[in-house]
Image (cartoon, rainbow, N blue to C red):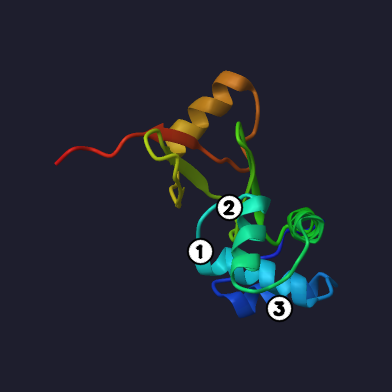
Amino acid sequence: MARQPNPTNLEGAYQNCRSLGLRLSRQRKLVLEILWRSGDHLSAREIFEQLNANGRRIGHTSVYQNLESLRAHGVIECLEKAQGRLYGHRSDPHSHLTCLESGSIHDLDIELPAELLNAIEANTGFKIESYSLLLQGRAKSK
């Protein structure tokens, strides 16, 4: 399945779904709204709880099924963490920085130097087509 360009807003995410032939049900729209509004990486349970706290009665299974469909079609990302799957609104190739104290995950748009990629290719015998770094750290004290 061809990856769609990452939309820059919620309406772009809706258009992305339409171009992929995904039906934009009320539940699917609400799940996308939560992800875009938070801009964070959330579990299915957190999304379910936010929707129900806002008076949107949607079952946990429906939330999970919509997340998995959006992930499978490349509309959203899914990170496998020790605490389970976390979903984010971005689907383009990018890296992540996890805070070791709070557990928060930050999206990073970084490009590795060509010399480093060339060295990796020379050492491994692989042609690098894409990459995603998983960095961990703590906030620097001022």
Q: CA distance from mark 2 to mark 3?
A: 22 Å
Q: CA distance from mark 1 to mark 3?
A: 20 Å
Residue type at numbered disc 2: Leu
Residue at 37% from the left image edge and 35% from the top image edge: 101
Q: Are marks 2 and 3 in contact (CB under 8 Å)?
A: no
Residue at 50% from the left image edge and 34% from the top image edge: 117
| Above or below, 56 relative to 137 | below
- Report whether 37 appears left or right of 72: left
Residue type at numbered disc 1: Ser
Residue at 67% from the left image edge and 59% from the top image edge: 48
The residue that disc 2 covers is 42
Residue at 50% from the left image edge and 62% from the top image edge: 39
Quarter where residue 141 is shown: top left
| Above or below, 64 relative to 119 | below
The residue that disc 3 covers is 15
The residue that disc 1 covers is 38
